[in-house]
Image (spheres, rainbow, N blue to C red):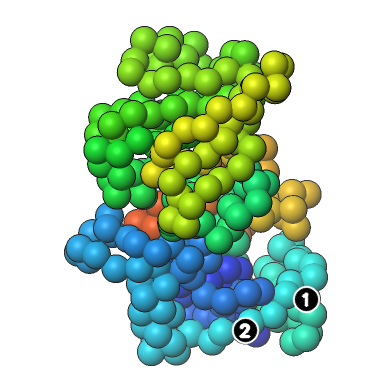
Amino acid sequence: MHDLLILGAGPAGLTAGIYGARGGLDTVIVERKSFGGQAAITPEVENYPGVQHTDGFSLTFTMEQQARSFGVDFVYDEVESVSLDGEVKSVTTKNNGVIEAKSVIIACGAEAKKLGVEGETSLIGKGISYCATCDGRFFKGRPVAVVGGGNTAVEDALYLSAFASEVYLIHRRDQLRASAVLADKVKNSSVNILWDSVVESLEGDPLEKINVKNVKTGETKALDVACVFVAVGQTPASAMFIDKVAHENGYILADENMATSVAGVFVAGDIRKTPLRQIVTACADGAIAAESAIKYLT
């Protein structure tokens, strides 16, 4: 029986582990893959306060080591089911059986949806990015493209237009899904909108060019770009919790204390409904969630 069970070893879960263990809780983190989450595969990080330049693996490795130094236990295993009702919470893992705890922090994260174009994965960090806020500044004075038509895509395009030499917004439909205010703003900006279009192929390593196809005419044209920012949505890793806690479009709802709709269950990081998904905000969520768990238990 543990005091605190954390699901996920990304920045949110690792920070929660550090704060929980330092607060005197017997803490265990369960992670199905490896520590760091999406942050661990980020090749360059320049916006984490106090760390001028690093890579995601190094940053999250330090977090993992710090958590271990405070006595956090790690179980690398796949969770098959969860039980969050009552005073005792539990998860059933594939290889380690049932793990019980008095409180739980859900920090399983979310995964960016992919373009599905050949070579996409190998170009991550070399011309493919899923976070304009994280990586946009690396392409100052260079041409870039954004794929998507929702609020995030439009906001990314407008953000990038402040310092990129040229910004293309590639959308598969003939009208944006973004709010009217944002749609009007981008239409009246320097952003070049390519309607009814999709990215068909990528060229170069690192990326040098993309081939864009008009889905109505079948016409294909090449664009010289240094990076494609993919903003076609995210998928929160919340399927296991949908019928157990309140959520909106799969993102778990929480109050300012990271408390969910279930007593003793908290949430942190990209899996919760939040206006910004960054390493620093995930860490802040984790710290708050752990402090809330401590108060709940005492």
Secondary structure of residue under mark 2: strand
Q: Residue at x 47, y 41 (%)?
A: 209
The answer, for residue 253, to whether it is visible in the render is: no
| Circles 2, 1 touching at the beta carbon (< 8 Å) | no
Residue 21 horizontal side relative to residue 101, left or right:
left
Of the image marks 2 and 1, the number of the one nearer the N terminus = 2
Label number found at residue 171: none
- Asked if residue 165 can be seen in this view, the reply is yes
Q: Is residue 28 above or below residue 245?
A: below
Give the camera-side residue of 116 and 275: 116
State the residue position of label 1. Answer: 92
Question: Left or right: 130 with respect to 144?
Answer: right
Task: Give the x, y percent position of residue 27.
Answer: 52, 80
- Quadrant containing the N terminus in the rendered view: bottom right
SS label for mark 1 = strand
Q: Residue at x 78, y 86 (%)?
A: 95
For label 2, the crowd category at 10 Å Cα-Cα, with few meaning under 14, some 14 to 19 and many 20 or more, is some
Between 248 and 201, the one nearer to me in the picture: 201
Q: Tell which tag, 2 or 1, sits nearer the viewer.
A: 2
Which residue is depicted at the point 76% across and 78% down? Answer: 93
**Above or below for 59 versus 268:** below
Residue 42, by quadrant, is bottom left
Q: Residues within 10 Å of mark 1 (few under 14, many from 20)?
A: some
Kind of residue at badge 1: Thr
| Residue marked by disc 2 | 75
Q: What's the distance in space between the residues labelled 2 and 1, CA to CA?
A: 12 Å
Number of numbered markers: 2
* Residue 174 image position (x, y, % from top left): 62, 13
Q: Amino acid at mark 2?
A: Val
Q: Residue drawn 27% across and 58% down?
A: 46
> x and y percent of residue 108 in the render?
60, 61
Residue 216 is situated, as x and y percent measured from the top left of the image, at 71, 17
